[in-house]
Image (cartoon, rainbow, N blue to C red):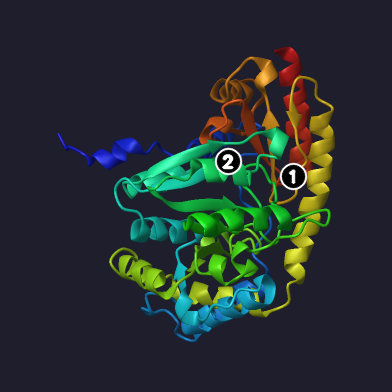
Amino acid sequence: MIKLAARVGEVPPSITLAIAAKAKAMKAEGIDVCSLSTGEPDFDTPEHIKAAAKQALDAGKTKYGPVAGELQLKAAIARKLRDDNNLNYQPENIIVTNGGKHSLYNLMMALIDPGDEVIIPAPYWLSYPEMVKLASGKPVIVRTDASTGYKITPELLSKAITPKTKLFVLNSPSNPTGMVYTPAEIKALAEVIVDRDILVVADEIYEKIIYDGAQHVSIGSLGKEIFDRTLISSGFAKAYSMTGWRVGYLAGPIELIKATSTIQGHSTSNVCTFAQYGAIAALESSQESVETMRLAFAERRQVIFELLDAIPGISCIKPDGAFYMFVNISKTGMNSLEFCDAFLEQQQVAVIPGIAFGADDHIRLSYATDLGTIKKAVERLDKFVRSL
């Protein structure tokens, strides 16, 4: 019998992927399943991005490339960070990774020693704590709730910092809540980070998907002291509907980027070469497709919020960004796993239990799908909740 490494037992399988897999299996049996589970835009990758990858294939861009990424792509990312985010990074400050998730994993492996603490506000993206555990660190979960818009306050952050704290994870716009930190909130958090001399990684994968005049501010843009303590994790999956392309990046101090490159060199090596040329086209071509998708998400957000708001016994806050509704189900008397299992079995709708995000009295609905599916799914949710 094979004895697995102890670290494997520390990390549960992804609930998100498990729910999605169950829904797909039911669909394969011919069941009419509505899925609001996965965070994947339903749009195809824009044609000019696919064309650039095809052109790269035809040009023979099929060989090994630099471990840290094609120089042309890293330069394009540096320009994007300068122009969009007011962050002065050079190509050598950037590593191209196999998706945004991989950039965070590389970071944890390069930075976290056994016993190091990483502060993670809850609700959180489900992989943050597990990555910390895999690096033998300790995730320190700071609970937030609807009263603060599910956002950590400077007071909560300061209170959570100990001599063992090494890193703070900031996700704005947020998965799963869709909340966006205001410029003033970002500034206040930056002051704590500088004062207590810790590092921050800003996961900005949803930065292009914001609504109602919300403003995305990169925390590292607020001055040299916070810039020196900041890492930026992002990628192309959400804004450009490139989920399957697996192209992300990490930007930060050179010594840390070199360390992540060493790790990547002994794990995955370079990201798929021709896919990187699609990413170059995504950054350097017209952003019209990004805006088209954002407007579609905005319409869906309004529709799903109004429908959810009319259902008695549940509640949610209208999100500022991303494409998720985080719904409070505490009044139903069920925990999130019980709720989602029963909902899928009785009404054939797949949603994600909030326990995956550190909030067992919530569920997450993704509106990154068509309006017809959204309306049918929420109609079934109304029927399900009223039956409880």
Q: Position of residue 164 (x, y in %)?
A: 37, 47
Q: Position of residue 309 (x, y in %)?
A: 82, 30
Residue type for callout 1: Pro
The numbered mark at residue 156 is 2
Relative to 191, residue 260 above or below: below
The outermost residue toward the left is: 1
Instruction: Using the numbered discs, state the Cα–Cα distance from disc 2 to disc 1 in whole angstroms.
Output: 22 Å
Q: Residue at x 36, y 71 (%)?
A: 261
Q: Is residue 253 visible?
A: yes
Left or right, 254 with respect to 158, comes to left
The numbered mark at residue 79 is none
Give the residue pinned by disc 1.
319
Task: Give SS at disc 2.
Answer: helix
**Quadrant assignment for the N terminus:** top left
Q: Residues within 10 Å of mark 1 (few under 14, many from 20)?
A: many
Q: Residue at x 77, y 71 (%)?
A: 288
